[in-house]
Amino acid sequence: MNPSLRIVVVAPDLDVANPEDEQAIRQAERSRNLRIGLLENGFNLVATLPADVFLTERIAQLQPDLIIVDAESDARDSLEHVVMATREERRPIVMFTNDDDTGHVKDAVAAGVSAYIVAGLSPERIRPILDVALARFQHEQALLQTLASTQSERDELSAELKDRKVIDRAKGLLMQRQGLSEEDAFKKMRKTAMDKGLKLADVAQRMLDVADLLA
């Protein structure tokens, strides 16, 4: 992974309001270790943001290359905010949590999380985790682009076949009504298309539409 990648961490405030809240203390400690680990590994940590209604705007301004979600009891809510914030422009998302509720994993993967890490966070694990997450994201994006390209090719082929059928029908109409040969009928349609600055299929469709009206 390129250390110059811009990374944003979405996490709660490190300040613990209640010193007796052990869960909040553990989460703050893990979050602090995560940020220290990123810096020790030479990553470009551009910001730490709360998971709130302003997240979409802040991410749009910062344009990070990768987003890390650091959450525990509020993991689902934090993830929803991040998904909404990256809906228009997808980015690799890595989620760190101590919440062992596996019900979150399915939702996280469906939402586009590239890596879901439960506990066991240590500085030396950060780089390989982010490497895998980024590679998986890039692989998925490549697959999506391939699927989109394949679908586009299919759509183009379908449109081409449809146009060909329309042209053949119009050509047959000219041959029948004006006694033209197939070649002459095609030349006449092509000349009309050139004279009017239209596509051959559009001319053919107009001919068929007129013929239907006069039938």
Image (cartoon, rainbow, N blue to C red):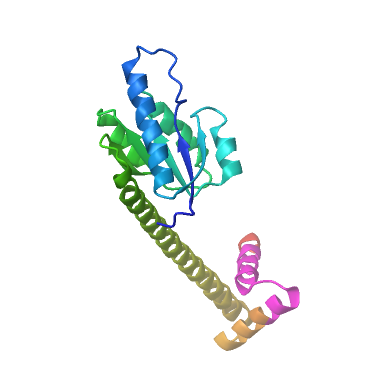
- Provide residue 101's location: percent of width, then percent of height: 26, 28
Locate residue 211: give its quadrant. Answer: bottom right
Q: Is residue 194 magenta?
A: yes
Vertical position of residue 103 compared to residue 215: above or below? above
Q: Looking at the image, which residue sits at the far front?
A: 40
Residue at 53%, 75% in the rendered image: 168
Q: Is residue 17 visible?
A: yes
Residue 104 x/y as whole percent: 30, 31
State the image quarter where residue 1 is shown: bottom left
**Whether residue 72 can be seen here:** no
Which SS type dominates the magenta stretch? Answer: helix
Q: In the figure, 121 relative to 161: above or below?
A: above
**In the image, which residues are magenta?**
191-211
In this image, 172 relative to 3: left or right? Answer: right
Residue 207 position within the rendered picture, expressed as x and y whole percent measured from the top left: 64, 69
| Residue appearing at x 33%, y 43% in the figure | 123
Residue 7 higher or lower than 23, as above or below: below
Quarter residue 105 falls in:
top left
| Residue that appears at 63% across and 68% down | 202
**Residue drawn 36% across the image and 21% down it:** 25
Q: Which is more toward the observer, 31 or 160? A: 31
Viewed as shown, does residue 74 lie left or right of 202? left
Position above or below: 194 against 146: below
